[in-house]
Amino acid sequence: MAGPQSGWKVFLNPGWIITIILVIAFSYSAFTILSPWQLNKDAQIVDRNEHIEQAFKVDPQPYSAVFDAQGKITDNQEWMRVNLSGRYLPEKEVILRLRPVESTPAVHALTPFQLDSGETILINRGFEPVTAGVEPTIPPAPNGVVTIIAHARVSEPTPQNPPTTADPIQVYGINTQQIGELTGLKLAQDYAQLSDDQPGLLNYIPIPKLDRGNHLSYGFQWIAFGIMAPLGLGYFIWSEAKERRRAKREEAEMAATTSTSGAGPDPNTPEPELPDSPATPAKETEPQPTTRSRSRYGNQHPNHYRRRP
């Protein structure tokens, strides 16, 4: 049977090659994909938190300072507060379904708001909790001219679920283009969300929590995993090489022992003297039994045919 391979050749087998490739691929992904993914999410959350905090420090701005001519938010000013003067269009109101607020099932009232300047912007007036089997009652928006303060929000992508055209119209996302087609209105590209204590507000939608989360620590963990994986592989390679060297050394020792025991005696080595053995006593001759002739008639009659000495 062939002994274990030595040197780097022992690692040229499919098992070790696949393991090395997987470790390299994992470390590469950890450094270039997984860790940057978590670190970028952390950076985005930090930027959002700072942006929201800054938005509350700035006084409400006029519509034209936050929205452009198409009603799109300019210069990344989402969550900025805007002053809007005009009137609600309650007859064009749309209900947003399946949008929980802090784990509470709820529906939202999306009501178009016509500005004094002529533009129409969609306003999220807040939410109403939903109870299973009970249709929620949504208070109508006030009539007449009002002035409201709202947060500028970016329109959402078109939802996958189609809207229902029942009265009232129900949608599953705040996409201003879709809602404009359903209501027949030319809405601003983005929308606004009512601030607290404003005319027409239902239940106030809380501002997103400014919790940073664990993305930063997750990013550092992926970096640590990317470093530990090749170190662990190096340890296993070192252990394997050490075990191979030990096995080879033991085989060499066994071979040396076998060759030594298989050689003949050294002719120059005198034979050991054996102790004198005691003389074996002569075997004594056992006396042979004497055969006596018995008379065929016993002792009563003499044997006349017995030879006399």
Image (spheres, rainbow, N blue to C red):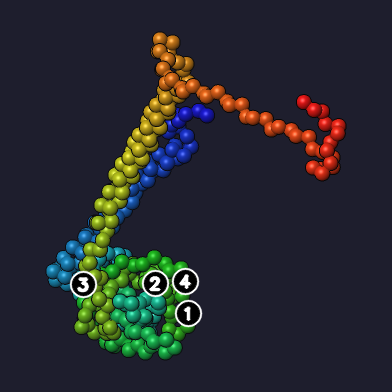
Q: Which of marks 1 and 3 is nearer the N terminus?
A: 3
Q: Distance between the residues labelled 1 and 3?
A: 31 Å
As drawn, the label of residue 173 is 2
The location of residue 99, given as percent across then percent down, is 37, 76
Q: Which of marks 4 and 2 is nearer the N terminus?
A: 4
- Please say if the residues under marks 4 and 2 sit with CB atoms less than 8 Å apart: yes
Residue 165 is tagged as: 1
Kindly report the distance in space between the C-alpha atoms of the residues bearing marks 4 and 1: 13 Å
Q: Would you name the residue on which mark 3 appears? A: 82
Three-letter residue code for mark 3:
Val
- Tag 4: residue type? Asn
Q: How crowded is mark 1: few (under 14 residues within 10 Å), some or many (20 or more)?
A: few
The mark closer to the camera, 3 or 4, is 4
Q: Is residue 298 left or right of residue 234?
A: right
Residue marked by disc 4? 161
Q: Do the residues labelled 4 and 1 touch (CB within 8 Å)?
A: no
Circle 3 SS class: strand
Between 204 and 282, the one lying in front of the other is: 282
Look at the numbered discs 1 and 3 and tell me whether their residues touch, using CB distance below 8 Å: no
Q: Position of residue 4 (x, y in %)?
A: 45, 30
- Report the amino acid beneath label 2: Gly
Element carrying mark 2: loop
Name the residue rendered at 39%, 65% in the picture.
Answer: 157
Please say if the residues under marks 3 and 2 sit with CB atoms less than 8 Å apart. no
Q: Which of marks 3 and 4 is nearer the N terminus?
A: 3
| 37 over 290 or under it: above or below | below
Residue 240 x, y percent position in the rendering: 38, 36
Label tally: 4
